[in-house]
C-alpha cells in the first residue's frame, strides 16, 4: 500500500514539474520571437492577447490542426519513432534537478522535497539520457529519405559526439570539487558562505567550456549546423510537419531548459539565493519559495543568453566547428581537470 | 514488484536481441541492439549497480552505437539479401554450437540449484561510484593504467593506418 501512495505522489510531482516547465518553455518561444524582434528593430508577434501572451496557445492549436504529411518513401516506423525519442529524452532528465530545498507546507508538519528523484549517480543519468537524445535527430534524418535531412542528421551526430566529450569533461572539475555525482548534494554543498559558495568561483574555465559545449549540444546558433536553413532547407526535420515537427521544436526548447538547469545547479549554486537563509531562516516556507524562484530566475537568465546569442552571432562553418571542438575546447577541458586536481592536492579542504 | 520489473526488462532484452539477429535491415538491427543495452542497464540498476548501468548507457548506447548508426547512415547500407548460398556450410556448425550453449546453460542452472550461496557481507555498496573509484585507483591501479595504454595504442594505430592509406593514393 505504501508503494502505491509513493508512486501516486511521484506521479503528482512529475505532473506539476512538467506542467511548470512546459509553460516556461512555451513562453521562451514567445520571448525569443519578441526579443529577436526588438534586436532586429521590428515588433514580433503582439496581436493574440495582450502583447501576444496567448501566442503560444495559438501556435499549438495551429500545429494540432495542420495536415500531417508523411513522405511516401520514408521508413515509416523509424520516421514515427524519431520525434518520440527526441521528446522523451529531453523530458526524462528533468526528474533529477532540485527545484528548491525541502519545503514545509504552512500550518502542517509535512515537508516535501522539491526534487522528484534523488540518487547516487544523477549526473551520469543526465549525461546518459542526453546521449540517447542524439538518436532522435539521427533517425529523423535517415528515415525521411531526403538528402537534406540525411545531411542534417549526419552533421548533428558528428557535432553532438564531438561536443559531448568537451561537455562531459568540463563537468569533471565541478565533480572533483564536490566529491559526489548526486546533483542534489552538489547544490547543498554550495549553500555554504550564506549561500554564495557557488562552484563558478572555483571553476570559471569549466563554466565557460560547459556553456559553449552546451549551446553546441542543443543545436542552437552559432552551432545550428544540423538545420542550417541557407544550405539544408531545414536540416533533419525538413520532411516533418504538424505535430511531429512541433515535437522536435519542443524537444529543442526543453533541451535548452534542462541544459540551463544543469549549468545553474553545477556552477551557479542551484536554488541557493545569497543571504536568503539569514533573512527567512532555514526550513521555512518563505525560504523554500524564495529559493525556488531564485532557481527559475537563474534558468531564465540562461535562456535569455541563448536568445541574445541568436540575435547576435552568425553561424560557424562545419570545419571551423570541428576544429574548435577538438583542438580548442577539448584540450582546454583537459587542462581544467588538471588544474582542478592540482588545486585539490594543495588545498584538500576546498 | 522487483520480480515483475525483472521479468519485464529481461523479456525486453531477449526480444530486442532476437529482433537484432532476425532483422535484415542493418539500421533496424542497430536500433534493436540499443534496446538490448538499455534493458541491460535497467537490470543493472535492479542489481544495485547504478554506476555500471549509467556507464552502460553512456558508453554503449550513447557512444559506440551512435558511431555504428553513423556509419550505416554514411555508407547507406542496403538491405541484406536473403540467405547467401555460399555460407550454407555454416548451418551444421551453428546447430552444434547452439547445442553446446544449451548444455552449458543447463549445467549452470543445475549447479546453481545445488549450491545455495548466501550474499557476501558489504555487498550493498559494491556498485556505488565511490567504492568503484577507490578500488580502481588503489587496488587495481596497474591493470587500469595498462588498459588505458592499450586503448591509446589502438587509437594511435588506427590513426597511422588511416593516414598511410590516404598518402598511398
Image (spheres, grey):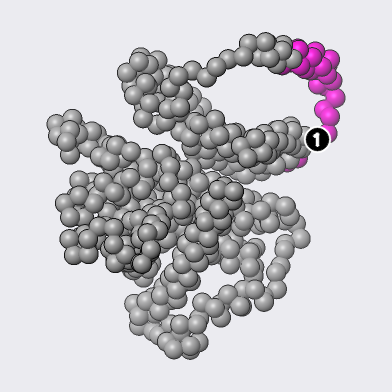
Residue drawn at (42%, 39%), measured in percent from left and top?
A: A121
Residue B159 shows in this picture = no
Residue A23 shows in this picture = yes
- Residue A262: x percent and y percent? 37, 52
- Which of the two residues, A250 or A155, is positioned nearer the viewer here? A250
Chain letter for mark 1, please. B
- Most frequent secondary structure within the magenta stretch: helix
User: Given the current orientation, which residue lies at the most extreme front position?
Assistant: A108
- Residue A257: x percent and y percent? 42, 61
Task: Please say if A290 is above or below A346.
Answer: below
User: Given the current orientation, which residue lies at the most extreme left position?
Assistant: A346
- Residue A45: x percent and y percent? 46, 83
Q: Give the residue number, with chain letter if any, for mark 1.
A: B81
Looking at the figure, which quarter contains the C terminus of chain A?
top left
Relative to A199, B31 lies left or right: right
Residue drawn at (84%, 15%), measured in percent from left and top?
A: B92
Residue drawn at (68%, 14%), measured in percent from left and top?
A: B113
- Residue A118: x percent and y percent? 43, 46
Q: Which residues are magenta?
A: B77-105
- Which of the two residues, B111 or B80, is positioned nearer the viewer here? B111
Residue B99: within the magenta?
yes
Q: Secondary structure at mark 1?
A: loop
Amino acid at each position: 500500500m505504501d508503494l502505491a501512495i509513493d508512486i501516486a505522489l511521484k506521479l503528482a510531482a512529475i505532473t506539476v514539474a512538467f506542467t511548470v516547465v512546459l509553460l516556461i518553455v512555451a513562453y521562451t518561444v514567445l520571448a525569443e520571437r519578441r526579443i529577436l524582434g526588438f534586436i532586429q528593430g521590428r515588433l514580433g508577434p503582439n496581436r493574440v492577447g495582450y502583447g501576444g501572451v496567448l501566442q503560444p496557445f495559438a501556435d499549438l492549436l495551429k500545429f494540432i490542426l495542420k495536415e500531417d504529411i508523411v513522405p511516401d518513401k520514408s521508413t515509416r516506423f523509424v520516421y514515427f519513432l524519431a520525434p518520440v525519442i527526441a521528446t522523451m529524452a529531453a523530458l526524462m532528465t528533468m526528474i533529477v534537478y532540485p527545484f528548491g530545498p525541502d519545503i514545509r507546507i504552512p500550518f502542517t508538519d509535512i515537508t516535501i522535497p522539491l526534487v522528484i528523484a534523488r540518487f547516487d549517480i544523477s549526473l551520469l543519468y543526465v549525461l546518459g539520457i542526453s546521449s540517447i537524445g542524439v538518436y532522435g535527430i539521427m533517425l529523423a534524418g535517415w528515415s525521411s529519405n531526403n538528402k537534406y535531412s540525411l545531411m542534417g542528421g549526419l552533421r548533428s551526430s558528428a557535432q553532438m559526439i564531438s561536443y559531448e566529450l568537451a561537455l562531459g569533461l568540463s563537468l569533471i572539475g565541478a565533480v572533483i570539487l564536490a566529491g559526489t555525482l548526486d546533483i542534489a548534494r552538489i547544490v547543498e554543498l554550495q549553500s555554504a558562505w550564506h549561500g554564495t559558495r557557488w562552484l563558478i568561483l572555483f571553476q570559471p574555465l569549466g563554466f565557460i567550456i560547459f556553456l559553449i559545449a552546451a549551446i553546441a549540444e542543443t543545436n542552437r546558433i552559432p552551432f545550428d549546423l544540423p538545420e542550417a536553413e541557407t544550405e539544408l532547407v531545414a536540416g533533419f526535420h525538413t520532411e516533418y510537419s504538424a505535430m511531429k515537427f512541433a515535437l522536435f521544436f519542443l524537444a529543442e526548447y526543453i533541451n535548452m531548459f534542462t541544459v540551463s538547469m544543469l549549468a545553474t545547479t553545477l556552477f551557479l549554486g542551484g536554488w541557493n539565493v545569497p543571504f536568503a537563509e539569514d533573512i527567512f531562516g532555514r526550513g521555512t516556507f518563505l525560504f523554500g519559495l524564495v529559493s525556488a524562484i531564485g532557481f527559475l530566475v537563474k534558468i531564465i537568465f540562461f535562456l535569455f543568453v541563448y536568445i541574445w546569442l541568436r540575435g547576435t552571432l552568425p553561424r560557424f562553418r562545419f570545419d571551423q566547428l570541428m576544429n574548435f571542438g577538438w583542438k580548442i575546447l577539448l584540450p582546454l577541458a583537459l587542462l581544467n581537470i588538471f588544474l582542478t586536481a592540482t588545486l585539490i592536492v594543495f588545498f584538500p579542504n576546498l | 514488484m522487483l520480480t515483475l520489473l525483472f521479468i519485464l526488462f529481461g523479456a525486453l532484452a531477449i526480444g530486442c536481441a532476437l529482433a537484432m539477429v532476425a532483422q535484415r535491415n542493418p539500421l533496424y538491427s542497430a536500433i534493436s541492439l540499443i534496446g538490448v543495452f538499455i534493458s541491460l542497464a535497467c537490470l543493472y540498476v535492479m542489481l544495485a549497480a547504478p554506476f555500471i548501468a549509467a556507464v552502460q548507457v553512456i558508453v554503449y548506447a550513447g557512444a559506440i552505437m551512435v558511431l555504428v548508426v553513423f556509419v550505416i547512415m554514411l555508407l547507406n547500407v542496403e538491405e541484406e539479401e536473403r540467405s547467401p548460398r555460399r555460407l550454407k556450410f555454416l548451418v551444421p556448425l551453428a546447430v552444434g554450437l547452439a547445442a553446446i550453449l544449451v548444455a552449458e546453460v543447463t549445467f549452470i542452472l543445475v549447479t546453481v540449484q545445488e549450491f545455495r550461496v548466501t550474499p557476501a557481507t558489504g555487498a550493498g555498496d559494491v556498485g556505488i561510484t565511490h567504492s568503484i573509484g577507490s578500488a580502481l585507483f588503489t587496488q587495481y591501479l596497474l591493470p587500469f593504467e595498462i588498459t588505458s595504454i592499450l586503448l591509446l595504442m589502438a587509437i594511435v594505430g588506427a590513426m597511422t593506418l588511416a593516414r598511410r592509406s590516404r598518402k598511398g593514393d
